[in-house]
Structure formats: structure tokens, C-alpha cells
Image (cartoon, rainbow, N blue to C red):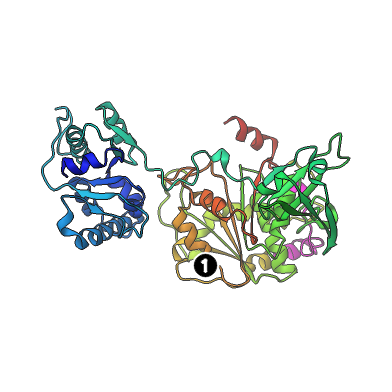
Amino acid sequence: MNAKRASKSATTKLFVLDTNVLMHDPTSLYRFEEHDIFVPMMTLEELDAHKKGMSEVARNARQASRSLDEIVSASEPQIKEGIPLYGPSRELASGRLFLQTEAMNGHIPSSLPTTKGDNQILGVMMNLQERFPKRPVILVSKDINMRIKARALGLESQDYFNDKVLEDTDLLFSGTQELPPDFWDSHGQDMKSWKQDGRTLYKVNGPLCRDMLVNEFVYLEAGPKTDKPFHAIVREGAGKSAVISTLTDYSHQKNAVWGIMARNREQNFALNLLMDPEIDFITLLGQAGTGKTLLTLASALTQTLETKRYSEIIVTRVTVPVGEDIGFLPGTEEEKMTPWMGAIEDNLDVLNKPAETAGDKGDKSAHSPGGSFSGNYGGDWGRQATMDLIRSRVKVKSLNFMRGRTFINKFLIIDEAQNLTPKQMKTLITRAGPGTKVVCLGNIAQIDTPYLTEGSSGLTYVVDRFKGWPHSGHVTLQRGERSRLADHAAEVL
């Protein structure tokens, strides 16, 4: 790379890519906009070492190698001057790609063994910094220890942030918005109101309408200006005016879903989404014990066995163990998945409990499950027959065999969705055929997959990308309803 070219680009940065960035995101070559990229020879060597196998990392390594091959083979004479990325990136990046074409060894401390790939990349960094003292030379790496070593040697280093949906998960869309106490005074001018399908709709005008997204829930709790709480869902928003509609009250016994009633505001919001046939995709977030799985299963059973809207319930989840793996499991796909589906079994037991035995015990069973299938069983025989009927409609599937499938008229539940990568999430959601509803459940504070963070989880990704789509909805459940012990543990531990 010549000094003339460097002086022209004094304002742009030179990013040195570590191998793990390319293996994490093969398209990272096109993500640096107007800045230049430098790929050391050691990065290429490590890509070659990781390309074998069927893992996600190996696939990404092969994809990165193919991308580099396409760029380099099309512009071979320009390797020393830097290959323009404007064409290959389809106008996403306007910088240049530089490859290491000569030996470059900076003065790294003798205590760092040069046989290690990381240290050789640091040597290249030091050499580049000596050559271009006026230009920012920055190492981009997903390896924390590599970044610490670089900073210890006085080199600038950064994490690769492009895949992160949000820097701060507190900014994640919650699906609900509290209205100010003076909402009706400030937004009630020229308001129109009408009835439709048993619900009242209001067309309001005002500054808050711009921030209202379709299928976002708005609420106003009882106060000096309002006699009783007002809960509604946005039907049209993001403009000068918005249309909001009242909700079905699922906290009332007459609207119980499979005997389950909403115990708080967010559970009521969630049930309104789960029971709405117009909503195809739902994400429910919340800490342990907020009722995500129970509400979803109750609405799935009602719509599968009672209203016959869906033909069966399909449940899947990522098989990431919390502790050490217990090894291979015997049996069919269904039997192998059974130990992973304990949460579903627990909730089915609650939903199948007769109303008279489900007294107020301070746990989930205090909902007094009923429903048309779970009232008078005719003793244990009837209860067992009901359980067999329910189980025949609930299919447990492994994530590994989802590629290429199409689900028609199914209720698909993706449990523990926080452990999915954005790519896996896309694979699952695109399985949905006509008449299928997809529900993603998870708690982004409980990620067990290595290398996934709250910001880069597939669950965070879909919540952010789907907000405002008319056929999707999201609710973050706030209050734990499992037991006083579970709620206290979730707070203090």
C-alpha cells in the first residue's frame, strides 16, 4: 500500500480484520462504508484452518473465503494499490480492500510468541501504524483478550458491532406505551368514535400519534382524570392521527381461555394478540414465571381443539444445556426431545387439572383451569383420555430438521427463542405457510448459547424488525405470577 494513497485517505480509517470477525459475519467486508479494510495473511491462514466441517463457523469461513476470492480474482492487478469495494459490495461500501503482500513484522514484545496467529496480526498492526502515523489504524476483533492485548501495546481496537440490533437492551421495543394523564385533553380534539365487531374505535389527533406503531398497546391507569383504566391497541399509527381500539377483557371469567384468565395488564395484552386470527407472528418476552408458556399453550389448545382454527400445535426449542451435557438420548425424535420439553409438560398438567382440585395454591394452578375439555372428567379415566387427546395434537419437533419444511394451519411455538441466532430465527419463521401462527417465547436475560449476547440474539433481532407490521405483535410481560419464591429469586439473584 503506497504512501500517496494513504495521504489521500487521511480522513478515512484503516480497519485490520481479525479472523473471528469474518467467521462471525462473512459479509463484514462490505460493512465499513467509506473506510479501508486490511486483511493480514494470518487471517487468511486461520480462515483456511476453520473451513472444514458442518458447523455454523465452518460455513461462515467458507462463505468469507468465497467472497474474498470473488473480489480478488476480479481485480488482481490492483491488489497492491487496494481493490475498490464499490462494485463487489453493490454500492454498500466505497472503501478499498488491502491484502498483506509482503512480510510485515512490527516490534512486538519478546514475551509474546510470534508462532501465535493473534500476535502476528498485532505485529502487522504495529507495522501499519509506523507506516501511516497520521491515519487511524484500528483492529476489529470479536476476541476480548485480543482487544485487551492490542490496547496494552498502545494500539486502537474495537468490537464488531454491525450485527448488534441494539446497543442497550433497555431500548428494546416493549410493545406497550403509557399515555399521559392529559391524553384525552391534548388528543381528543375532533375525535371520531365508532363501533366495530363489538369493540369501540377512536380516531385521535395529536403529537403522540407519530410514535404509535400498529399493534402497540396503549394504556391509561385510573387516576384523578380517569375513573377506570383504559387499555387499547393501535390499529393505525405513525402519522398525524391514529386509530385505537378497545380490547377484549381476558381478566374476566366469561372470557377465560381454556380456563386461564389474565392476572395483570400485560397478560391481558398478550392474550389479545394470541387470540387474534389476523396476527400471524407474536413475540413474548419476560422473566421466569411471567406466564409466557402458559398463556400461549392455553390459547393454542383453545384454537386447535375448540375453534379448530389450527390443525395441531408444534413446539420446538434450541437444545442448549444449562450445565454439562448428559450425552445421547435414546428413542425417536419425539422421545429425544421430551426431556427438553419439561416446561410444556408442566403447563399441560396445569391446563388439564380439574377446576375443583386447582385451588388457590399461590402458583400457576390458581387460575382454576376449566375449558370445554377440562371441567367434568368422569374420574381419572376421563382425565387420562383428555390428556391423551391433548398430547395427540401437540407435536414436539427438533430444530435440526426444520430446513425445507412448510407448516400449514399450524400453531408453531418457539420456546427459549433467546438462544437462537438471527439466521436460525429466519429459518424457523420462514417455515410458516398459509394459516400458520408463529409465537416466539423467551427471556433475553437467560442466554445459554456461547457467543450470543442480548444485543445480537435472534429474539432481539425479530422484535426490532417486526415492530409496526400489521400482522405481528409484541409484549414484554412484567410481573411474575409463578410464586412469591420465584418472583423474589428473579429480583435478588
Depth check: 161 or 329 in front?
Answer: 161
Q: Is residue 139 left or right of residue 258?
A: left
Q: Amino acid at mark 1?
A: Arg
- Image location (x, y in percent) of residue 17: 28, 44
* Residue 364 visible, this orientation: no
Q: Is residue 86 left or right of residue 131?
A: right
Depth check: 259 or 249 in front?
Answer: 249
To which quarter of the image does residue 65 belong? bottom left
- Image location (x, y in percent) of residue 280: 63, 63
In the picture, the quarter occupied by the N terminus is top left
Q: Is residue 15 left or right of residue 383?
A: left
> Going by the picture, which residue comes out furthest to the right?
227
Q: Is residue 443 left or right of residue 368?
A: left
Question: Which range of residues does the magenta coloring cover?
Answer: 363-386
Depth check: 331 or 168 in front?
Answer: 168
Residue at point 51%, 59% (across, down): 337
Check the image and report above or below for 249 versus 115.
below
- Image location (x, y in percent) of residue 400: 44, 62
Residue at point 26%, 27% (across, down): 154
Residue at point 74%, 61% (across, down): 380
In the picture, the quarter occupied by the C terminus is top right
Q: Is 12 one of the magenta-colored residues?
A: no
Image mark count: 1
Disc 1 target residue: 431
To which quarter of the image does residue 438 belong? bottom right
Q: Check disc 1: other Cα within 10 Å, few if <14, some if 14-19, many if 20+.
A: some
- Image location (x, y in percent) of residue 182: 80, 38
* Residue 39 visible, this orientation: yes
Q: Is 369 one of the magenta-colored residues?
A: yes
Callout 1: SS: loop
